[in-house]
Image: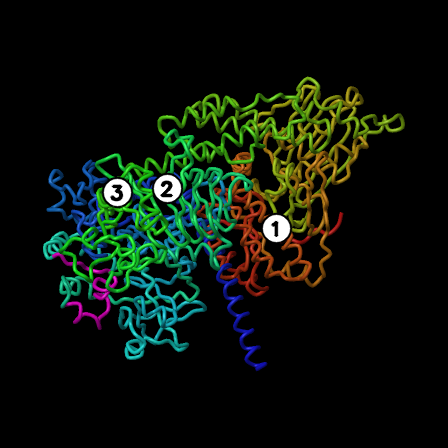
């Protein structure tokens, strides 16, 4: 008994741990995939993206909807501007099967490229066919050979989305691939609701990396989200490859199965082998007989993902471009060609005899049969299927529920005026007071008026129930949707009518009445008997007994809105079933079936209505933010959505600008920082189309950031920081003693300050104003010497000759006769503005002793320009420290670090505190800043063991990439995004702060490998903040070094400069160092370095 109990407990723990692991894998996979998607769209030169994204559609009308969605994806940054997008319907709206649809889509894409090259303006006909009559260059619809060759070199994503979504009928109008999937929605709360399509794009962006430079086709399906790292796929050259995953036999019996050869190329997580056979929904006996079982008793599931490369891709393009007659044959014979049964079988020799008996099978074998298909087994792939309504809700409430954003771009009432379950998912919806929504229910793209009750585990999509405020009704509408039901609303073509459609969550529209088919969760026979409806009322006399099902049942009336709601309650069994008035009203009304509805949707009206609805929601959120809030929302992003209302969007943004309160320059009591308030005005002006005014106001943003920084560093700085007539001497005197004193008056003092450079492991950007003025920052960095010396320094001497002589290590020299003539702003090309600003922030230029004496200031930095090692800030720290020593001021490291913050704002370069901290304090340190007035810094040295220091020195390579970088442009982009409250940026910097804390613990525990993992994630986050922090040369360098490293990153803001490479061990470090010294592929230099431990 005890053993049984323990065994059950072990199974329960195993299942719980598996669920936690699955949730973590999904979250990590999606976040990395989204990171790569954003990077490929923002910087496709660095991270290649798809040359074309093609969707198949069931009809020309659905293709128009998909075209709208593709344009939306481009607008939102899901698809690069350079990517060609096409939505290709089956010809004439007749079903030809997924295999023929694949050939048709490739053919239309080839013609599209030819039209682009020849400037032809014609496009797809309304029925989905191509008008090739006018061009004369299409050779009867076949593109010329050069364009076939061109297409064969392209990287194409083909997504099959042309189904009719019978098992998820509420997704039929939008297309199942575009159903809402709010995974990670909380990462971007002011952005649009993520769709299944968006997540598929993210996963596929990683697959593009696996193709490298060889052209090819990547096929996915629109009802599956395969969560795996697609960038790690091994795709054989010149061959088709189907992606598989091990699965249990009960699941395999409902899907396609791949029988792979036992001889396979195997690495740690995947295997590639020849495909020996294909099985469709096999029984256990068929699996055993077909030798489809793996050693662990599972089998290989066909995921529906296919990659075609090299010669196989060329042959497929050639077949597709000559497929017009093949498709015409299918249309005439009313047959279909399946992708997964027919076309794929041409690449599997054991299927050839079977295939030749199929429609066009001989043609497929002759044209494609030379190549053999491989199976790539992705062991870590998690297969999220959206095949039924209940499966969709399961993904929202199951193990993945922690990923789900349950409130997104919505307007919901207070908890005291409504009853909305915490687990309900409310997306892009407006809900009035007096509404009840049950547990785990999805409400999407709706406006719900008072008096509506929605049960648990239900789906409500596109419902727009008018309320008293709409003027359509005088009393609140009463309507209740039972538990486990779906209801949706659709505009109809060729009229102004809309229809309300509904069914049970578990209803299968394809199951006939004779096989216990259901409607609203009840057997059809019971529904008909209870409501006194005759079969002839809903099915024609020609419909066979085994064909009578929900899909073709003419049961949904088209009537005035509230009569449709009344009949909905009656049909669901919620009203008096014997109510003759309801039966008469229903029987006398025009009615539609799901099948007819599929062909009757007004997609244009649906898209326009949805776009206007979401823009209206965004406008409401923005209005509340400006009227009642602290400007904490991303108004820039909200305005982009508002502007989708073509006629009124800009006017709404103008109204918002007028609502912005006037900013009083000396209003220190304002909670909202002036930099943020100015940025809001700039964004609203851009939205209004007032570009000139926006550009003029933008300068005030940076003036405000500088003033806020000065105020936080030393109270009172902001009043005089940018006042050219007074300088900042008045406020400085409170902290620094400017009178040298009678005893020292006649001494000509001289100081020399030398400092190390710093390398940062993690935490950069959290030290940068305005982030560090409003939120805590954490940085883990290290002070180092290069080539055996301290590379940065200054010598400052007092002279008997009045004036200031400044010189640098490039033999530049400047003499300033009157120091008080040094006033901001400074030209960005001024080589001496750093020293000039140091003279200002220390108050030295106002020292009365300089009226009779002068200064000589010499600076040097023995590191390459644009190193990223904090050179500018550390040199500023050296000069500030030296000047304070000259005048006996407070030259403590914390005071110097804060003064350099002010100095950098005065220079116009911006920047944070980590560089000067890195150079002023020796060794490895963990530094935290605490926002407030004044800004407080806490520097915690890491007392690491000699063994750890030795191992770090052996494994860490400090390499100059040869790429000169300038942090200011990257910094301005990041600061602007922060001032806009870009949620992705905020969450990225928060993660960097967390990683700095983890990195500190790792080093204290002597875990250098974990430090490598942290560096890798930090580098990914830096690229999330700004994709231009790297370039193609740096990417190639890191790709070259990756096999030897457990972590790498550019130091500082990136963009070039120095890189840190943390080798897997000392041997790998020596090998990599040797390779870098021998290769001529990179203009790199590996520097000798050592930790600077004390002054």
Direction from residue 224 to residue 278 in the image, left or right: left
Above or below residue 264? Residue 682 is above
Give the CA separation, mark 3 to mark 1.
63 Å
Q: Quadrant of the N terminus?
A: bottom right
Task: Residue 19: tell me if it is visible.
Answer: yes
Residue at image location 13% in from the left, 39% down from the top: 135
Disc 3 is placed on an element classified as helix
On residue 585, which mark appears? 3
Disc 1 is placed on an element classified as helix
Residue 469 image-quadrant placement: top left
Dot 3 or dot 1: first in sequence order is 3
Residue at image location 71% in from the left, 31% down from the top: 857
According to the picture, the residue beneath numbered tag 2 turns out to be 463
Direction from residue 647 to residue 935 in the image, left or right: right
Graded by Cα atoms within 10 Å as few (under 14), some (14 to 19) or many (20 or more), the crowding at tag 2 reads many
According to the picture, the residue beneath numbered tag 1 turns out to be 994
Task: Residue 219: tell me if it is visible.
Answer: no
Q: State the residue in front, 1011 or 843.
A: 1011
On residue 85, which mark appears? none
Above or below residue 186? Residue 907 is above
Range drawn in magenta: 334-356
Dot 2 or dot 3: first in sequence order is 2
Residue at image location 75% in from the left, 40% down from the top: 893
Graded by Cα atoms within 10 Å as few (under 14), some (14 to 19) or many (20 or more), the crowding at tag 1 reads some
Q: Is residue 336 magenta?
A: yes
Q: Position of residue 341 (x, y in %)?
A: 23, 64
Mark closer to the observer (1, 2): 2
């Amino acid at each position: 008994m005890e053993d049984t109990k323990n065994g059950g407990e072990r199974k329960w723990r195993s299942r719980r741990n598996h669920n936690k692991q699955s949730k973590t894998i999904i979250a990590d996979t999606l976040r990395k995939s989204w990171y790569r998607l954003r990077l490929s769209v923002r910087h496709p030169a660095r991270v290649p993206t798809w040359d074309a994204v093609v969707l198949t559609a069931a009809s020309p009308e659905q293709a128009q909807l998909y075209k709208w969605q593709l344009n939306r994806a481009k607008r939102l940054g899901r698809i690069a501007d350079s990517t060609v997008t096409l939505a290709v319907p089956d010809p004439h709206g007749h079903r030809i099967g997924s295999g023929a649809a694949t050939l048709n889509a490739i053919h239309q894409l080839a013609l599209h490229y030819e039209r682009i090259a020849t400037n032809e303006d014609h496009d797809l006909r309304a029925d989905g066919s191509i008008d090739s009559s006018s061009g004369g260059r299409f050779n009867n619809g076949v593109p010329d050979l050069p364009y076939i060759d061109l297409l064969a070199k392209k990287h194409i994503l083909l997504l099959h989305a042309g189904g009719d979504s019978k098992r998820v009928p509420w997704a039929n109008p939008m297309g199942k691939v575009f159903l809402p999937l709010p995974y990670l929605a909380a990462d971007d709360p002011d952005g649009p609701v993520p769709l299944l399509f968006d997540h598929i794009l993210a996963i596929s962006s990683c697959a593009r990396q696996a193709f490298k430079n060889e052209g090819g086709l990547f096929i996915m399906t629109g009802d599956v989200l395969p969560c795996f790292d697609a960038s790690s796929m091994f795709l054989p050259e010149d061959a088709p490859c189907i992606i598989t995953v091990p699965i249990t036999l009960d699941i395999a019996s409902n899907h396609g199965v791949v029988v792979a050869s036992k001889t396979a190329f195997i690495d740690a997580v995947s295997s590639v082998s020849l495909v020996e056979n294909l099985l469709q929904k096999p029984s256990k006996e068929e699996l055993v007989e077909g030798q489809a079982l793996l050693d662990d008793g599972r089998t290989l599931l066909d995921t529906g993902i296919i990659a075609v490369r090299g010669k196989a891709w060329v042959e497929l393009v050639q077949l597709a471009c000559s497929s017009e007659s093949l498709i015409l044959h299918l249309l005439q014979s009313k047959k279909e060609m399946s992708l997964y049964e027919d076309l794929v079988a041409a690449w599997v020799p054991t299927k050839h005899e079977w295939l030749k008996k199929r429609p066009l099978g001989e043609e497929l074998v002759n044209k494609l049969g030379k190549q053999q298909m491989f199976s790539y087994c992705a062991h870590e792939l998690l297969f999220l299927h959206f095949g039924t309504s209940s499966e969709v809700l399961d993904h929202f409430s199951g193990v993945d529920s922690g990923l789900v954003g349950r409130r997104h771009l919505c307007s919901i009432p207070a908890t005291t005026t409504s009853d909305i379950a915490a687990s309900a998912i409310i997306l892009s919806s407006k809900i009035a007071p007096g509404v009840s929504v049950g547990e785990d229910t999805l409400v999407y793209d709706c406006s719900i008026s008072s008096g509506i009750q929605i049960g648990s585990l239900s789906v409500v999509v596109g419902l727009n129930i008018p309320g008293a405020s709409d003027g359509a009704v005088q009393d609140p509408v009463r309507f209740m949707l039972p538990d486990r039901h779906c209801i949706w609303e659709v505009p109809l073509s060729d009229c102004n009518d809309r229809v309300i459609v509904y069914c049970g969550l578990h209803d299968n529209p394809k199951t006939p009445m004779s096989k216990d088919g259901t409607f609203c969760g009840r057997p059809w026979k019971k529904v008909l008997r209870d409501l006194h409806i005759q079969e002839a009322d809903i099915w024609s006399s020609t419909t066979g007994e085994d064909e009578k099902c929900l899909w073709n049942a003419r049961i949904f009336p088209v009537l005035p809105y509230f009569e449709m709601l009344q009949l909905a309650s009656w049909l669901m069994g919620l009203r008096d079933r014997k109510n003759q008035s309801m039966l008469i009203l229903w029987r006398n009304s025009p009615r539609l079936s799901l099948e007819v509805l599929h062909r009757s949707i007004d997609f244009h009206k649906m898209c326009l209505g949805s776009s206007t609805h979401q823009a209206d929601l965004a406008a409401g959120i923005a209005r509340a933010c400006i009227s009642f809030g602290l400007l904490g929302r991303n108004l820039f992003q909200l305005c982009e959505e508002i502007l989708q209302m073509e006629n009124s969007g800009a006017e709404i943004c103008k109204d918002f600008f007028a609502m912005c309160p006037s900013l009083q320059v000396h209003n220190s009591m304002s909670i909202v920082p002036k930099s943020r308030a100015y940025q809001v005005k700039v964004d609203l002006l851009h939205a209004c189309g007032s570009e000139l005014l926006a550009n003029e106001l933008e300068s005030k943003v940076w003036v405000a950031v500088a003033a806020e920084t000065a105020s936080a560093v030393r109270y009172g700085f902001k009043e005089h920081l940018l006042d050219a007539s007074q300088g900042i001497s008045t406020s400085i005197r409170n902290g620094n003693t400017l009178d040298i004193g009678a005893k020292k008056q006649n001494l000509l003092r001289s100081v020399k300050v030398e400092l190390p450079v710093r390398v940062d492991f993690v935490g950069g950007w959290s030290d940068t104003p305005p982030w560090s003025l409003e939120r805590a920052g954490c940085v883990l960095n290290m002070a180092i010497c290069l080539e055996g010396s301290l590379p940065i320094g200054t010598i400052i001497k007092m002279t008997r000759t009045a004036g200031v002589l400044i010189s640098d290590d490039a033999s530049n020299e400047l003499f300033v006769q009157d120091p008080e003539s040094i006033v901001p702003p400074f030209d960005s090309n001024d080589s001496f503005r750093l020293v000039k600003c140091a003279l200002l922030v220390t108050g030295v230029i106002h020292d009365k002793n300089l009226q009779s004496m002068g200064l000589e200031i010499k600076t040097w930095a023995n590191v390459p320009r644009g190193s990223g090692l904090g050179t500018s800030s550390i040199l500023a720290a050296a000069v500030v420290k030296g000047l304070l020593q000259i005048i006996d001021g407070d030259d403590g490291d914390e005071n110097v670090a804060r003064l350099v913050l002010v100095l950098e704002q005065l220079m116009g370069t911006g920047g944070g505190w980590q560089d000067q901290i890195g150079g002023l304090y020796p060794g490895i340190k963990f530094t935290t800043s605490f926002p407030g007035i004044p800004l407080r810094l806490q520097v915690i040295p890491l007392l690491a063991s000699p063994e750890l220091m030795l191992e770090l020195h052996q494994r860490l390579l400090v390499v100059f990439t040869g790429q000169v970088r300038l942090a200011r442009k990257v910094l301005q982009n990041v600061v602007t995004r922060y001032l806009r409250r870009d949620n992705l940026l905020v969450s990225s910097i928060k993660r960097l702060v967390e990683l700095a804390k983890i990195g500190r613990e790792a080093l204290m525990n002597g875990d250098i490998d974990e430090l490598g993992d942290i560096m890798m994630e930090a580098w990914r986050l830096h690229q999330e903040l700004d994709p231009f922090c790297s370039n193609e040369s740096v990417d190639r360098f890191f790709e070259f070094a990756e096999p030897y490293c457990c972590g790498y990153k550019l130091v500082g803001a990136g963009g070039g400069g120095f890189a840190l490479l943390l080798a897997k061990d000392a041997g790998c470090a020596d090998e990599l160092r040797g390779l870098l010294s021998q290769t001529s592929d990179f203009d790199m230099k590996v520097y000798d370095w050592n930790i600077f431990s004390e002054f």
